[in-house]
Structures are given as C-alpha cells and as structure tokens.
Image: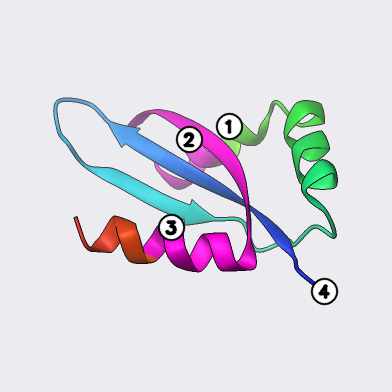
Amino acid sequence: MIEWFIIAMVYFKDTDRVEIKRMEMPFKSQELCKEYLRNTPNIVYDIQKLEPNSVGASFKCFDTNGVKQFLKNTRSI
C-alpha cells in the first residue's frame, strides 16, 4: 500500500536557500493528505516554529515514490 506524505518547501529571505521538510505522519490516500492540508491551516505556524527565520512555505502531498524522486531531484540541482 502506498503512503502519502506532506512535503513543505520552506523559503528564506534574501537567499536562494530552500529547506525541504517531510511530515512524519503518513496518510492512506492522496485525498486524505489534501484534506488534512485544507483543514489544518495552522500547519504554517508549525513550520515557523521549526524555522523561525523562514519567510514562507508551500505544501504538497507526495506518495512514497514521489518523495524519493523529489528528494533525489532536489539534491541533484
């Protein structure tokens, strides 16, 4: 069974630095993952607590294979 995870791309002021964070809690489907994002707007505050110098973040749901591919491609840039 494929699990889905929330990936946060965290941005920082006056730099090209982007931190990639993966939420530990898996979801059973893409729809449940997206529903969690829709129903949990305070997730942004969690990122601000983890990275107080960040200026913003974007969130997306990836399955296990997508997470691996995303992290591989991100590191290779």
Helix, strand, or loop for circle 4? loop
Q: Quadrant of the C terminus?
A: bottom left
Q: According to the image, label 1 marks what residue?
A: 45
Give yes or no for residue 62 being in the magenta stretch: yes
Q: According to the image, label 4 marks what residue?
A: 1
Helix, strand, or loop for circle 2? helix
Q: According to the image, label 2 marks what residue?
A: 48
Give the mark nearest the N terminus, 4 or 2.
4
- Given contact means CB atoms under 8 Å apart, are the residues at marks 4 and 3 in contact? no
Q: Amino acid at mark 2?
A: Gln
Asked whether the viewer can see residue 52, the reply is no
Give the mark nearest the N terminus, 2 or 3.
2
Q: CA distance from mark 1 to mark 2?
A: 5 Å
Q: According to the image, label 3 marks what residue?
A: 70
Percent x, y for residue 54? 35, 33
Percent x, y for residue 38? 77, 27
Give yes or no for residue 69 being in the magenta stretch: yes
The span picked out in magenta is 47-71
Q: Amino acid at mark 3?
A: Phe
Percent x, y for residue 2? 76, 69
Give the mark nearest the N terminus, 4 or 3.
4
Q: CA distance from mark 2 to mark 3?
A: 22 Å
When the figure is inspected, residue 12 is found, relative to residue 66, above or below; the finding is above
